[in-house]
Amino acid sequence: CSKVKSITEAQETTVAQCILAHSDSVKGSILLIQAPGTPTLIKGTISGLTPGKHGFHVHEFGDMSKGCESMGAHYNPDGNDHGNEDSGHVGDLGNINAGNDGVAVVKKISKRIDLLGDRSIIGRGLVVHEDPDDLGQGDDAESLKTGNAGKRLACGVIVIRDSK
Ligand code: CU
Ligand code: ZN
């Protein structure tokens, strides 16, 4: 009976959320949704941005004790160089694109982000940056670490959303 129950639970869709904070102007709310064995849907809106592209990553630590700086580097369980969503750090989510109203509508489907198992990103940090992410194509050392995405504008901890 307990075995049947655990299978049932594993087949449930996991829903996590992240409220982006630590900024006077940039605010956002992101949902992350994954059914077992399927890619993770990452969706939401972020407002208060300058128009254009902004780097967007999962960082190692859900630690905001020193603001967004204590979230560490990009989540990188495979020891990759920084890059794009397919082959860079697992936490590399590329760019989000804000319109002239400063609002970015986020909708990404990630094959490498997991909400379940030993590579779950629950409890880690999500960061939106001031500058575009060059996806590792910047031809300098920093490009292969951070994508030259610059200052951390806003961030939040990824948490399981309470099921009602
Ligand atoms: Cu980042
Ligand atoms: Zn990266």
Image (cartoon, rainbow, N blue to C red):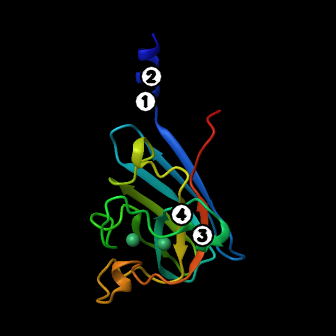
Residue at the limit of the structure toward the right, as seen here: 24
Of mark 3 and mark 2, the one earlier in the sequence is 2
Q: Which element is circle 3 on? A: helix
Q: Which residue is mark 1?
A: 10
Residue at 44% x, 82% y: name it. Answer: 132
Q: Amino acid at mark 1?
A: Ala
Res 70 label: 3
Mark 3 CB within 8 Å of ligand 1:
no
Q: Are marks 3 and 1 in contact (CB under 8 Å)?
A: no
Q: Amino acid at mark 3?
A: Ser
Residue 131 sits above or below residue 124 on the image: below
Q: Callout 2: few (<14), some (14-19), or many (20+) C-alpha neighbours within 10 Å?
A: few
Mark 1 CB within 8 Å of ligand 2:
no
Between residue 102 and residue 59, name the one nearer to us. 59
Residue at 43% x, 63% y: name it. Answer: 75
Q: Which element is circle 2 on? A: helix
Of mark 3 and mark 4, the one earlier in the sequence is 3
Q: Which element is circle 1 on? A: helix
Residue 32 sits above or below residue 151 on the image: above
Give me the C-alpha separation between circle 4 and circle 2. 30 Å
Relative image position of residue 17 (x, y in whole percent): 57, 51
For discs 3 and 1, the disc positioned in front in the rendered view = 3
Q: Is residue 94 left or right of residue 47?
A: left
Give me the C-alpha separation between circle 3 and circle 2. 36 Å
Q: Which residue is mark 4?
A: 126
Res 6 label: 2
Relative image position of residue 163 (x, y in whole percent): 61, 35
Residue at the limit of the structure toward the top, as seen here: 1
